[in-house]
Image: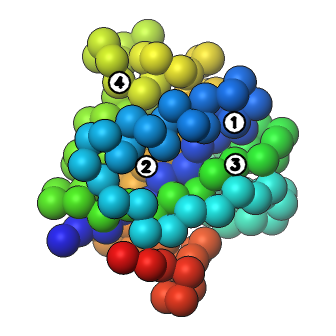
Amino acid sequence: MERTFGIIKPDAVKNGFSGKIIDRIESEGFKIIGMRKLSLSKADAEKFYAVHKERPFYGELVAFMTTGPVVVLCMQKDNAVKAWRDLMGATNPADADANTLRKLYAESIEANAVHGSDSLENAKIEIEFFFSDKDLVA
Ligand code: IDP
Ligand code: MG
């Protein structure tokens, strides 16, 4: 069974959507095997999004991700990486399909409610960034 990594971003936590998003994750058949609420430090956000360092929105993205607490998630399901990306919807909520998390809950292309790993390789790296083995309970 595949594992992926997700974040409920500061906008969605602040707007009171954490519970709705977690409910949806479970009703779509994901098993949540790790979950923690935390505040990202600037250094953590910079490191987590280092792959986007050269993109023009990097500084603003790091600033946004440190505006308030987030919920980090490790989720398990068949084809979890793709299934979670599909459930999230397009990066820009204006382009997201109906009933995706970003269509339902995102504020903007930046404050877009959720993060999800884009590959199995990155899922492993991102899970390890936030969770140790003993934090993951299947
Ligand atoms: P993804 O989250 O759908 O994988 P990425 O291209 O990996 O999208 O971008 C990472 C994050 O950076 C997005 O989720 C969003 O928060 C932010 N972002 C992406 N494109 C823009 C933009 O054009 N302006 C502002 N923020 C952006
Ligand atoms: Mg991405």
Position of residue 35 in the picture relative to residue 33 (left or right)? right
Residue 47 or residue 82, whichever sits in front: 82
Upstream in sequence: badge 3 or badge 4: 3
Position of residue 126 in the picture relative to residue 66 (left or right)? left
Between marks 2 and 1 in the image, the one whose residue lies nearer the viewer = 1
Task: Give coordinates of residue 59: x percent, y percent.
Answer: 75, 42
* Residue 59 visible in the shown view: no
Task: Give coordinates of residue 51: x percent, y percent.
Answer: 53, 58
- Amino acid carrying label 1: it is Val
* Residue 24, placed above or below residue 80: above
Answer whether labels 4 and 1 touch (C-beta < 8 Å).
Answer: no
Upstream in sequence: badge 3 or badge 2: 3
Around disc 1, counting alpha carbons within 10 Å, would you say few (fewer than 14), some (14 to 19), or many (20 or more)? some
- Amino acid carrying label 4: it is Thr
- Amino acid carrying label 2: it is Gly
* Residue 111, placed above or below residue 61: above
What whole-number distance in Å separates the C-alpha atoms at marks 3 and 2? Answer: 13 Å
What whole-number distance in Å separates the C-alpha atoms at marks 3 and 4? Answer: 19 Å
Q: Which residue is mark 1?
A: 13
Upstream in sequence: badge 2 or badge 1: 1
| Residue 5, numbered circle | none
